[in-house]
Structure formats: structure tokens, C-alpha cells
Image (cartoon, rainbow, N blue to C red):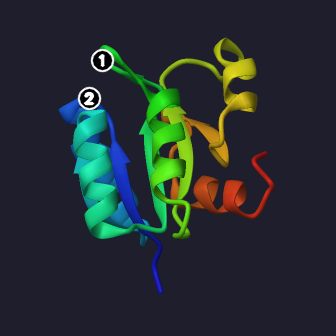
Amino acid sequence: MALRAVIVDDNGSFLAAAQGLLEQEGLDVVGVASTATEALEVVEELEPDLVLVDIMLGTESGFELTRRLVELDSGRASTVILISTHSESDFVDMIAESPARGFLPKSDLSVDAIHRILAGHPD
């Protein structure tokens, strides 16, 4: 069975492109959101296996959203992976302190990369 995912990003063009790419690769993208508030509602309603969260959500913080999702999700099995156009080295300390499972540059976004992070082998 395919992983059920929600993508959270404030860039509508990226949301559409990422959803199309990941669905083509076999991921079941069950929802998208552009703000932290939308993300919390969508995740609570749809209970996905995976939430991909952009670090820079306009004026909002993807790190703060990740913390809130993990708190909200304490009884469920959703996993959060942070994504960004920025390099991991730009946020290495914040990523390490985050409850997210891992980080993926948007340029490397793929189902294979997601599965490597979920398996504990990000490289």
C-alpha cells in the first residue's frame, strides 16, 4: 500500500509540481496546505502517514509547524520530513533539534529519497 502524504508549502506552483511528481512515483498525496493552520486541519482530518513541511512557510516557521504536528499527532503514526530550496547546512542545528524525521532539499524530492529517510538512510 502506498504511503499517504500531505505536502505543506506556501508556493502553489511547487505544491502542484511536487504532488504530480510524487503521485507519478507511487506516493498517495491525499492533501496539500499552504499555511500552518491549513496543515494542522488537513493532517488532523486525513491522518496521513507522512507530512512534507517546507521550512520557510512565508511568514510562518516550518520548524514550529513540525513541533505542533508532532504534538497533535502523538497518538498517530505520521512522520514529518522537512523540505526546502535552501541547503541543509543553512539549518543544520535547527533540523537536528527538530522532531522531524529528516530533511530533503526540494531539488532531490522523490519517493526513493523519502523511503531512504524513513529507513534511516538519508544518503
Q: Is residue 43 left or right of residue 56?
A: left
**Which amino acid does the dot numbered 1 rest on?**
Gly
Q: Is residue 92 visible?
A: yes
Question: Could you say which disc has been placed on residue 58 in the image?
Answer: 1
30 with respect to 117 (left or right)? left
Q: SS class of the residue under badge 1?
A: loop
Mark 2 in CB contact with mark 1 (< 8 angstroms): yes
Image height of 13 relative to 88, above or below? below
What amino acid is found at the position of numbered circle 2 in the picture? Asp
Which residue lies under the disc numbered 2? Answer: 10
First reached walking from the N terminus: tag 2 or tag 1: 2
Q: Can you say whether 93 is above or below 22 in the image? A: above
Q: Residue at x 26, y 65 (%)?
A: 45
Answer few, some or many: residues within 10 Å of disc 2's Cα (few below 14, many 20 plus, some between 14 and 19): many
Q: Residue 70 appears at what percent x and percent y?
A: 54, 50
Near-viewer residue (99 or 112): 99
Q: Which corner quadrant holds the C terminus?
A: top right
Residue 3 drawn above or below residue 65: below
